[in-house]
Amino acid sequence: MNKIALITGATSGIGKATAFKLAEIGYSVIITGRRTERLMELEHKIKTEYKVMALSLNFDISKRIEVEKAFEKLPNEWKNIDVLVNNAGLAAGLGPLQTGSIDDWERMIDTNLKGLLYITRKVSPIMVSRKSGHIINIGSIAGKEVYANGNVYCGTKHAVDALSKAMRIDMLQYGVKVTAIHPGMVETEFSIVRFAGDKSAADKVYEGLTPLYANDIADAVVFSVTRPPHVNINDMIITPTIQANTVHTIRK
Ligand code: NDP
Ligand code: 8X3
């Protein structure tokens, strides 16, 4: 079998683009997400267009039992995962902490943080025992800085940044590479989810500017996994050219 990559949150945006690009360079891909129909379509497209193997795993990453059961169901020949892309995540809401929705906070913490840990806890021991593997965590510039009303989302992404550094130390002696990629503004379904389906609020985020697109981040994943064995890309911050940080953005 070819090298295997598992990409969480592959039904949309950055995860979907990454699944395509890794398939394009010959990886067998395990794609995950909650939306079954999209997974099926994607699996079919990957198999027919790239002639590689693809397998869908349908589970909610924020639910520990679902993650564990999905992983246990994985056929043995798929278990030797070479690349884990921890991408599934979301922002829910944008408002001051003092009036924040605790349900939204829990969704973000359970998905962006606990979900990433649940799947990493299943995959990383295999990488450690094989003394080989690469974990790529999709963080955010919200994990490097904070911005008004971003509070809990920023907190989860700061945690992803910290966990990336910690994983790199813990797995150093086993030759497992850990890369964190921190995107700025990427036009995906992210803002639609953040604003609970309000398309016009989501569109405003990208009004008058050229954002990043999912493929730009997928390219960074491909760059990271195609370095020679002695090279590890630790950390990348990628913004659109019109964005200096979470606050300074040029709009027409
Ligand atoms: P999208 O909303 O387009 O994609 C999010 C993906 O995460 C979907 O495939 C979704 O799948 C999956 N997901 C969300 N919640 C769950 C869950 N509970 N269980 C399983 N899968 C889940 O957004 P992006 O592609 O933009 O986001 C990908 C990552 O990039 C996130 O971690 C985000 O924080 C990060 N990021 C995004 C930026 C942006 O501006 N867009 C900038 C910086 C970082 P499904 O709904 O089918 O479960
Ligand atoms: C998404 C980027 O700036 O909306 O992680 O938080 S931002």
Image: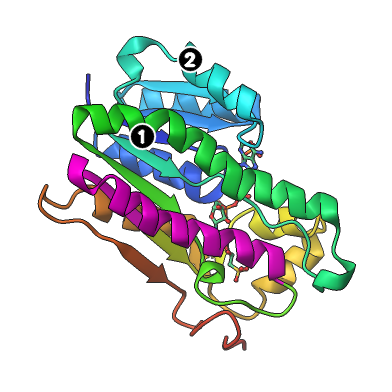
- Relative depth, front residue between 114 and 187: 114
Q: Position of residue 108 (x, y in %)?
A: 69, 51
Residue 124, numbered circle:
1
Q: Position of residue 45 (x, y in %)?
A: 45, 28
SS at mark 2 in the image: helix
Q: Residue at image x 65%, y 31%?
A: 60
Q: Evaluate whether residue 10 shows in this view.
A: no
- Relative depth, front residue between 201 and 83: 83
Q: Is residue 10 left or right of residue 75?
A: right
Whether residues under marks 2 and 1 lie with C-beta atoms below 8 angstroms apart, the answer is: no
Q: Amino acid at mark 2?
A: Glu
Local packing at callout 1 (Cα closer than 10 Å; few below 14, some 14-19, many 20+) is: many
Is 136 located above or below residue 101 in the figure? Answer: above
Q: Quadrant of residue 205?
A: bottom right
Magenta residue span: 150-179
User: Magenta span has 177?
Assistant: yes
Residue 67, numbered circle:
none
Q: Amino acid at mark 1?
A: Ser
Give the distance between the C-alpha atoms of the residues marked 2 and 1, in whole angstroms: 14 Å
User: Magenta span has 134?
Assistant: no
Q: Residue at image x 48%, y 20%?
A: 71
- Which quadrant of the frame does ligand 2 lie within? bottom right
Q: Position of residue 147 (x, y in %)?
A: 65, 79
Q: How many marks?
A: 2
Quarter of the picture containing the N terminus is top left
Q: Is residue 136 left or right of residue 175?
A: right
- Relative depth, front residue between 46 and 89: 89
Q: Quadrant of residue 18?
A: top left
Q: Position of residue 16 (x, y in %)?
A: 49, 42
The residue that label 2 is drawn on is 72
Is 243 located above or below residue 91 in the figure? Answer: below
